[in-house]
Amino acid sequence: MATAKTIVSEAKVSCDGGGGPKGHPKVYLTFEKGQKTLVCPYCSHTFSIS
Ligand SMILES: [Zn+2]
């Protein structure tokens, strides 16, 4: 299974796993200052800030 990665431009992102078997309750994740990547604790989806 490939690890999905999303490039975002805002420090606040939400993830719900995209539905289906990897779906989970919607959570909001926030990039800390200087942080470049975030990993969703539920589905391990990776977010990178541009
Ligand atoms: Zn997720």
Image: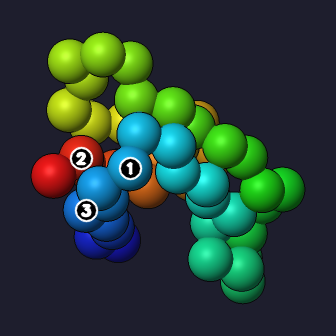
For the question of whether residue 39 can be seen, the reply is: no
- Using the image, determine if residue 27 lies above or below residue 32: below
| Most distant residue in the left direction | 50
Relative depth, front residue between 45 and 50 = 50
Mark toward the start of the polypeptide (3 vs 2): 3
Q: Answer few, some or many: residues within 10 Å of disc 2's Cα (few below 14, many 20 plus, some between 14 and 19).
A: some
Q: Which residue is tagged 3?
A: 7
Residue drawn at point x = 40 percent, y = 29 percent: 31
Image coords of residue 22 (percent x, y): 65, 69
The part of the image, by quadrant, that contains residue 9 is bottom left
| Most distant residue in the bottom direction | 20
Which mark identifies residue 10? 1
| Most distant residue in the right direction | 25
**Circle 1: residue type:** Glu
Check if mark 3's residue and mark 2's residue have beta carbons within 8 Å: yes
Disc 2 is placed on an element classified as strand
**Circle 2: residue type:** Ile
Q: Which residue is tagged 2?
A: 49
Of badges 3 and 1, the one in the foreground is 1
Residue drawn at point x = 26 percent, y = 36 percent: 37
Mark toward the start of the polypeptide (2 vs 1): 1
